[in-house]
Amino acid sequence: MISIENALQKITQQQVGLRKKEVSLENSIGYWLADTIRAPFDLPAFDNSAMDGYAVCGLQETYEIIGEVAAGDTGNKTLVEGKAIRIFTGGKVPENTSAVVMQEKTEVDGNTLKVLMELKANQNVRPKGGELSNGQEVFQQGQHITAATVGLIGSLGFDQVSVFKKPSIRLISTGNELVPPGKPLSSGQIYESNSYAIVSALKKYDFECAEKQQIKDNYNQIKEGIADYLAKSDVLLLSGGISVGDYDYVKEALEENGVEEVFYKIAQKPGKPLYFGRKGHKFVFALPGNPASSLTCFYIYVLPLLQQMSGANAAGLPRIKTPLTHSFELKGDRPAFLKARLEASEVSILDGQSSSMIHSMALANALVLLEPGIYNESDNVTCIIL
């Protein structure tokens, strides 16, 4: 049994082979950039108006209106002292523009513009290169692509993006007692939910499960299922069957399939019987069967490796130090990941911390990592944001 820190170190030190591919800009969200992006021109590319109003030359009270500029107009206009041009948001400001005055602060009588406020030089003018200059680094390799990232890349004129390929992921859940949701239950059976939770967690963090299957507690079937999915996957996830019960066949079946154990069992609650192994360039996580244990181990151990394999420059969930809203005592001799609720920069540890309880996990938006001991209200604790 190893420590949490040692387990994470063994995972993050794994050598992974990053692979690049080109994707269209519209399909790039959720990937990580494989190349640094630099601005190919100044942004904005020209001085433009920050609002609808009037471009004026000179700082005075009245002007003569001599024309109009709409967004997208490509012509070049020039102002002289005392003249004004009607302009719209994003429109290219004329040469010699002193300021843009918003239309709500003006009165117009024929061709005469009266300004109803004190003007300042360059007011409401977005200067050329004010956001980015030509050649400036915009995003580093490993930047996660969000909707805003896509918008900025598009504004720079790129319609293709070089990204890192994501790992191919498959999932096996095991257990005689498990029944798919929607089917009738018999006495002693429970609905299989871990695979749905894990697949949903993968989607939340921009990964996909290529295939999943449920297998009874049958050694040969589990061994065959592992062999099939290992051949097609970069990462194989298993749920259940990894403890020390008479029908827990997963560890033996992995060994028979040539998977080399990196570690087995972590000194933590919940999720002690976590298995991590490797076969060549393929990785295997065997997650505990209890729902809270399974999801906790996914968040803490599986997700960082998936991000690392996808070229992320920062792997794992965000961690912050934040005060507790109440006192708490963690008994026992192992550190624990506790389901918690983070609100207004304070965190509350929820009731229902048993590894079999998914209700509190569903209410949680964070995990609090504590060592055994007594904690007082307002003590700062490590909070992992889900």
Image (cartoon, rainbow, N blue to C red):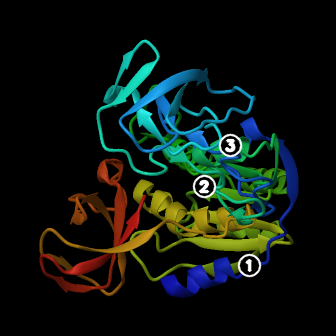
Nearest the eye: 353 or 365: 365
Rendered image quadrant of residue 364: bottom left
Q: CA distance from mark 2 to mark 1?
A: 39 Å
Q: At numbered mark 1, what does the secondary structure look like: helix, strand or loop?
A: loop
Query: Circles 2 and 1: CB distance less than 8 Å?
Result: no
Nearest the eye: 230 or 378: 378
User: Which of pointers 1 and 3 indicates the residue nearer the eye?
Assistant: 1
Query: Circles 3 and 2: CB distance less than 8 Å?
Result: no
Query: The disc labelled 3 sits on which kind of residue?
Result: Lys
Residue with the mark numbered 3: 212
Q: Is residue 321 above or below residue 257?
A: below
Q: CA distance from mark 3 to mark 2?
A: 46 Å
User: Horizontal and vertical percent for residue 321?
Assistant: 32, 76
Residue positioned 65% across, 73% down in the render: 276
User: Which of pointers 3 and 2 indicates the residue nearer the eye?
Assistant: 2
User: Horizontal and vertical percent for residue 201?
Assistant: 53, 49
Q: Is residue 15 above or below residue 124?
A: below
Nearest the eye: 371 or 238: 371
User: Horizontal and vertical percent for residue 187?
Assistant: 38, 36
Residue with the mark numbered 2: 131
Q: At numbered mark 2, what does the secondary structure look like: helix, strand or loop?
A: loop
Residue positioned 22% across, 59% down in the render: 344
Query: The disc labelled 2 sits on which kind of residue?
Result: Glu
Nearest the eye: 195 or 248: 195
Residue positioned 50% across, 87% down in the render: 3
Residue with the mark numbered 1: 14
Q: How many marks?
A: 3
Query: The disc labelled 1 sits on which kind of residue?
Result: Gln
